[in-house]
Amino acid sequence: ILIREKFYYNPLPEQLELKKSDIDGHGIFATMDLDKEFDLGATHIKMPIYNGFVRTPLGGYLNHDESPNCYLTQVYEWDDYKIFHLFTMRKILKGEELLLDYDG
């Protein structure tokens, strides 16, 4: 695998869409059923040059809920760079909003 392919991300994967949310502003919604542990792609990238994290479009529109259906995990690391991806905690149904526990 080429490095550029390994770290490539799509701002909003075809399985997702941005819509008005009942929780806050806009949110990310499934356009099809998604299996448990489905990798939806990069949400946050730790970049030393910025002395912090950069959110991708996917990471920027995730709404908070204390009963989330998704979680973040670090999937790549090289030097001081780290890439976090969003994974489903359970099966997500078409039309369902993706939710993350910001405190968890």
Image: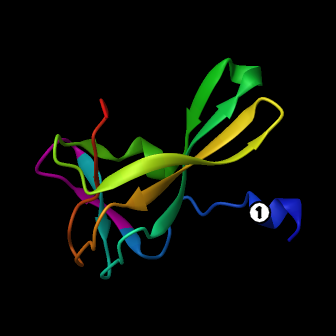
Q: How many marks?
A: 1
Residue 10 magenta? no
| Picture residue at 83% right of the left edge, 61% below the top | 4
Question: Element under label 1?
Answer: helix
The quadrant of the image that shows the C terminus is: top left
Return the residue nearer the eye: 6 or 97.
6
Measured as percent of width and height from the top left, residue 79 is found at 84, 33
Return the residue nearer the eye: 22 or 87.
87
Measured as percent of width and height from the top left, residue 37 is found at 42, 68
| Residue interval drawn in magenta | 17-25
Measured as percent of width and height from the top left, residue 20 is found at 20, 55
| Picture residue at 38% right of the left edge, 50% below the top | 71
Q: Residue furthest right?
A: 2
* Drawn side of residue 86 relative to residue 74, left or right: left
**Residue for badge 1:** 6
| Picture residue at 54% right of the left edge, 46% below the top | 56
* Drawn side of residue 1 relative to residue 70, left or right: right
Q: Is residue 54 above or below residue 73?
A: above
The quadrant of the image that shows the N terminus is: bottom right
Q: Residue furthest top?
A: 51
> Dividing the picture into quarters, in which one does residue 17 lie?
bottom left
Q: Amino acid at mark 1?
A: Lys
Question: How crowded is the residue under tag 1: few (<14 C-alpha within 10 Å), some, or many (20+)?
Answer: few
Q: Is residue 64 above or below residue 49?
A: below
| Picture residue at 22% right of the left edge, 77% below the top | 93
* Drawn side of residue 75 relative to residue 30, left or right: right
Return the residue nearer the eye: 29 or 6.
6
Residue 20 magenta? yes
